[in-house]
Amino acid sequence: MKFKRLPKVLVLVSVGAISACSGSLPSRTAHKDEAIYSATIDGVKRDNLTWANAYDAVIAKTKATSGAERNEYLHQAEDILMSTGAIAPIYYYTDIFMKSADMDGFYSSPLGYKFFHRATVGSSTDYTVCVGPKGDSYDPAKNSAVDGAIVISHVFEGLYRWAKPASGDIAADLEPAQATGFEKVAVGSEGHVKYTFTLRSDAKYSDGSALKPSDFANSWARAASGKLGADYGYMFDCVVGYEATAADEDKYLPLSGVTADDNAGTLEVELISDVPYFLELTAFPTYAPVKLANVQKADGSEDDAWWLDPAKYIGNGPLKVTSIDNKEGGKIEFAPNANYWDNANTKVTKLTFALTDDDNNQLTNYNSGAYKFIDSVPNEQIDSLKASKPNEFKINGQLGTYYVIFNVNDNTLNKKLANESQYVTFRKALSLLIDRNYVCKNIGKAGQEPANTFVGKGIMENNDGVLSEWTTRSGVNRDGSGYFKVGENDYEANCAEAVEMLKSLGFKYNEKKGSFSDIPTIKYLYNTSSGHKAIAEYLQAAFKPYGIKLKLESQEWATFLNTRKDGNYSIARNGWLADYNDACSFLDMWTTNSGNNDAQFGR
């Protein structure tokens, strides 16, 4: 999921989200996606595939296989991804935040969500927190940002949920939520499995209307549909019937693998394989049930702003929205949902989310007591806050990666580079010029570790009963070496290698000055935040001695997300938190038709 803040190593899922120009940049049609790749699929070596062809085929195999075979396909997918040079990992996240010392009952999920409905601050049940800026969308089907998911997770709830931990504040387990449980059986001869969920007999929306299995089925059809075209539509690709639903742009075609029986109170879901993370998907916001009547206008078309109206933004979670002012400096106010099945455990009587991307403003309000929790702090204040408020400044584990992304369709260097192979070399060279240890120690300052893989540290894989951490087997040799060296003593050699790579592309190099004279200025986009700005300025300074000039441009969060998604940028900052503890969460987002494919692969 796209991550907005200065991304913060481990535990565990833009937000989860560039130039100032408007409109679409011209594609490099002369050599777009010309890179030829070989992939072993179904045990057969297939040559002469484009990058996108190979990648889509390998990801498809991860959906239909299991165990060690599936994991090998996932590793192969990361090999292909990293071979493009379009993804330059910088570090593995940690999660930093400030929490009032007398806040009790707060917890977070391993995916970055924060939960406040059970939390009190001393004797107060009415308080304000800040978890991010104004949202791009709080529609469960359309949101792809972590801060948006936090809002949604207070208003909506899936079949399962993250359980409040017995101790600490990181939830590690799932528990039944809108469902009381499930049964799972194998079906057919193609490796399919079927889940049968039984919904709670008292399940309701916050307006008191009954929540039925068909509400889940219909909401999933909408979220997966080609008509909606949601970023996360591909999250249903493990469900039988997904391809037909995703291809239909005229209506919300039901997923053929989903059967709702409102009389029996059951929901049957047939999967194309025994997906190891499916229960985590049922706790994911995209799988939440919405009241479709509230989403539609009188003429039957979608109301894109329905989520801005509390009268329409009706959910089934622990809280309900009573007012929303979705702007910088605005706020969202919540009250308990009296119709929530577990309402007895809701402690807040009023919860306010302040909406701001200004981390200096957040800290000022936190220090004054106006905010009891903030999810971002000014980068230059981290050291002093760790020292002065050790009981309030928190560093938690998190599964995710902060990275730089290249738009593979950008045309900035078209007059200098002749083909995709040369662009790959150029992108990899710039990646090698980044001193990741410097960024972690001098900018991140919160236990981040240099990243040489895209899949985040802490992601696990199960190879037929043998459990291991993903990065211990990462890299083309499956030896844990990753895709480049990130030791403190490796940076000088990395830079020397980068210079030779750039020389090989024909750029003019002045041996005396140690720099190139004819590399065009490149635009680098980031979203407003002192941490992102610090990293952008570091990159600008690190590249400058080599004659590589970055023009820095900043956009507010919601605008930035759409600029990057639309491919209207050259290079941009990016971050991804896992949506579930599986490498697939980092890898299936790069398929040709994925709404999260910000690099524009295959397009």
Image: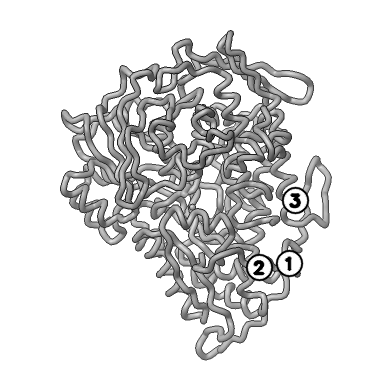
Residue type at tag 1: Thr
**What is the number of the mark on residue 130?**
none
- In percent of width and height, residue 41 lies at 78, 44
For the point 22% across and 56% down, the residue is 384
Eyeballing the image, is 146 above or below 115? below
Q: Which mark is residue 54?
A: 3
Q: Residue at x 50, y 27 (%)?
A: 291
Q: Residues within 10 Å of mark 2 (few under 14, many from 20)?
A: few
Q: Nearer the viewer, mark 2 or mark 3?
A: 2
- Local packing at callout 1 (Cα closer than 10 Å; few below 14, some 14-19, many 20+) is few
Percent position of residue 394, x then y: 29, 44
**Amino acid type, label 2:** Pro
Q: Which residue position holds label 2?
A: 26
Residue that lies at the very extreme toward the top in this rendered image = 264
Q: Amino acid at mark 3?
A: Ala
Residue nearer the viewer, 300 or 11: 300
Front-most of residues 267 and 13: 267
Q: Residues within 10 Å of mark 3 (few under 14, many from 20)?
A: many
Residue 219: image quadrant is top right
Q: Residue 29, labelled with which disc?
A: 1
Circle 2/circle 1 CB separation < 8 Å: yes
| Disc 1 and disc 3 in contact, CB within 8 angstroms | no
Q: Is residue 503 above or below residue 428?
A: below
Q: Residue at x 45, y 62 (%)?
A: 526
Question: Residue 25: in sight, yes or no?
Answer: yes
**Mark 2 to mark 3: distance in Å?**
24 Å
- Assign a secondary structure to mark 1: loop
Between residue 532 and residue 147, name the one nearer to us. 147
